[in-house]
Image: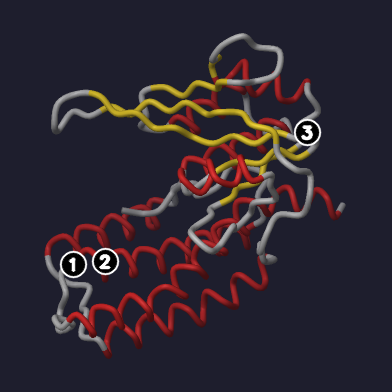
Amino acid sequence: MLFEPRSGRLAAWGNALLAGLVSPDEAVSSIVGEDAVHRVAGLPGESGPVGLTLALGRMRALGVGGLRVALPAPGHPLGLSGPPEFNARALEAQEAVVAVGAALGLVPEVAEAGPAGDVHFSVTWHVLPVREAPPADVPSLGEAERELAEALREATVVLTRLDVAASGPVAEAALSAYRARAEAGREALAPGYPARAVRVLALAQRVDLMVSLAYENGHGGAVAASEMAARAEALRPVERVARRALVAAYNSAVEERERD
C-alpha cells in the first residue's frame, strides 16, 4: 500500500545511472521492480518500442543529464511545465517523468494480464515533447519536510475528530508492511540521493498511508454524507502536501547537481 510511483523509480534509478553510480542492469532491475517488463515508445531515433537499457543509453546520447518526477492531480499540475498535450497525458496517468537537458517527457501506460491472483503488469513509457521551463509547485526538501510534519499532525487530528480509526486487519497488515520495510532498511531511493531526501520520502509515504487507510478502511463514525464529505475535504490538503514532498524527494538529486 506504500505509494511508490513508477515514475519515482524511473527517475531515481535513472538519475543514479546517468551519474555513473549504478550499472545499467541494476538500474533496469530496480525500475522494473515487480512488473513483467518496461518498454519505451516514441524515443527519437527509434522506429518502435525499445527496452529500458537501450532507452536510457539513447536518452544520455540525446543530452539527458537528469530526470524529474511529476505527480499531477486535477487542479494541481505538480511538476509539469507543458505543453498542454503532455500535461493532459500526465494528468490522465497521474504521473510522469521529465528529462533535464532535452525537451522530453515520459508518461507510463500500464497494462495487466493474467488470471485473478496471478496478474502481471507491463509498462510502456510514451515519450512526448515537453516545454523546458521550471516545474510547477515543487518545494525544496526543507519546505517539504516542514509541511509534512504539520500535515501529519493535522491528519491525526482530523481522523480522530471524524472517528476514522486506522484499525482492522487491512490497516494492521499495511502498517506491519510499512514497519517491516523500515526495519529492513530497504533502500528507499537510489545511490546519489541526500539522506534528507530519504527521510522526506519515508515521511511522505507514511502520511500517504494514513490517508489511504482513512479512505479504504470503512467509514468509522463518519456515516452521514455530510461527514464523509467533510473527511474528504479535510484530507485533500494533506494528500497534496504528501505528493509535493514525494516530488521534492525524487527530484532532489537533480536539484543538488544543478546547485553545484
Seen at 67% across and 71% down, the residue is 142
3 or 1: tag closer to the N-terminus: 3
SS class, disc 3: loop
Residue at the limit of the structure toward the top, as seen here = 47
Seen at 70% across and 39% down, the residue is 130
244 up-or-down from 189: above or below: below
Judging by the rendered image, the residue that carries numbered circle 2 is 213
Name which residue type carries label 3: Ala
Task: Kindly indicate the quadrant of the structure image that contains residue 111.
Answer: top left
Mark 2–mark 3 distance (CA, rounded to whole Å): 39 Å
Residue at the limit of the structure toward the front, as seen here = 84
The disc label shown at residue 102, or none: 3
Position in image of residue 114 (x %, y %): 20, 23
Mark 1–mark 2 distance (CA, rounded to whole Å): 5 Å
2 or 3: tag closer to the N-terminus: 3
Q: Do tag 1 and tag 2 residues touch (Cβ < 8 Å)?
A: yes
Position in image of residue 107 (x %, y %): 54, 36
Name which residue type carries label 2: Leu
Name which residue type carries label 1: Asn
Q: Do tag 3 and tag 1 residues touch (Cβ < 8 Å)?
A: no
Task: Kindly indicate the quadrant of the structure image that contains residue 123.
Answer: top left
Graded by Cα atoms within 10 Å as few (under 14), some (14 to 19) or many (20 or more), the crowding at tag 2 reads many
